[in-house]
Image (cartoon, helix red, strand yellow):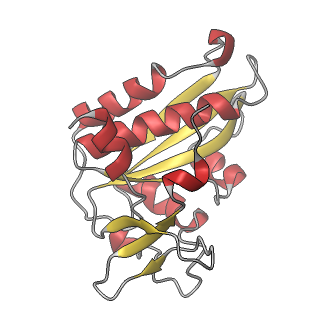
């Protein structure tokens, strides 16, 4: 898959099958994060993959999915939970936080996953303190920035043109596919 096709095709996936992700692929996803841009090459971020089912089961209740659909239709059930989670952590001895590097690393991981058929969801609606405690990281010099949920997709999602109302909220179409409104290229870009 070429890079442009991956960028244009990747959409957030929030429901997953129970098929495990091979460890080799988890390693490639983590390596993509490691090699992502970092301001002044500080490399303050750390990436911890959680693949243990007991740990995943403990973390799951401390995550929130699909905020635009409060009826829960876009949230996974425990049977549709991710089979891996990557914690994006910041080593506070190097920097208190690094939002820009975290964004670059998250995109690198999600594109690497997508190119291998794995779905992803970048998550900030999480209980950071509880997740650190569950992973026995609460006494480390690490802050939890966000996490990436990973798994083989149990749902479909596609980009659609934004309607004239300008509403950006995603919704399920008649075909059961999650529709994700996107502004037009002309509305958000200009070549000077």
Residue at x-position 63% and y-position 37% = 137
Residue 27's spot in the image, x, y percent?
A: 32, 29
**Residue at image point 64% right, 45% down:** 132
Q: Quadrant of the N terminus?
A: top left
* Percent position of residue 188, x then y: 60, 50
Residue 83 horizontal side relative to residue 125, left or right: left
Report the side of 157 relative to 123 (left or right). Answer: left
Residue 113 can be seen, yes or no: no
The answer to whether 116 appears left or right of 159 in the picture is left
| Nearer to us in this view, 183 or 17 | 183
Task: Give above or below for 180 relative to 22.
Answer: below
Residue 157, picture quadrant: bottom left
Q: Residue at x 68, y 10 (%)?
A: 40
Residue 125 location, x and y as percent?
Answer: 64, 60
Displayed quadrant of residue 142: top right
Most foreground residue, 181 or 99: 181
Residue 10 lies, with reference to residue 95, above or below; the image says below
Residue 43 visible to an observer of this rendering: yes
In this picture, is 143 found above or below 119? above
The C terminus sits in image quarter? top right
Which residue is depicted at the point 22% across and 42% down? 116
Q: Residue furthest front?
A: 192
The reply, left or right, for residue 72 in relation to residue 31 is right
Q: Compared to 25, does 20 lie above or below? A: below
What is the tally of numbered marks visible in this picture?
Answer: 0
Instruction: Pinpoint residue 161: horizontal percent, then vertical percent.
Output: 45, 68
Q: Nearer the viewer, residue 143 or 135?
A: 143
**Foreground: 140 or 168?**
168
């Amino acid at each position: 898959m070429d890079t442009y096709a991956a960028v244009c095709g990747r959409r957030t996936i929030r429901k997953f099958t129970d098929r495990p992700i091979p460890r080799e692929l988890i390693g490639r996803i983590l390596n993509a994060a490691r090699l992502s841009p970092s301001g002044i090459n500080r490399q303050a971020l750390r990436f911890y993959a959680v693949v243990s089912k007991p740990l995943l089961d403990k973390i799951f209740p401390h995550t929130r999915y699909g905020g635009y659909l409060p009826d829960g239709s876009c949230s996974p059930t425990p049977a549709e939970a991710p089979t891996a989670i990557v914690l994006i952590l910041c080593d506070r001895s190097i920097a208190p936080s690094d939002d820009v590097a975290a964004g670059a690393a998250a995109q690198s991981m999600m594109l690497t996953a997508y190119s291998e058929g794995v779905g992803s969801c970048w998550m900030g609606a999480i209980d950071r303190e509880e997740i650190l405690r569950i992973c026995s990281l609460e006494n480390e010099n690490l802050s939890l920035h966000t996490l990436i949920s990973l798994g083989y997709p149990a749902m479909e999602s596609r980009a659609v043109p934004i309607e004239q109302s300008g509403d950006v909220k995603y919704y399920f179409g008649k075909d059961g596919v999650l529709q994700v409104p996107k502004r037009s290229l002309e509305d958000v870009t200009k070549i000077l």
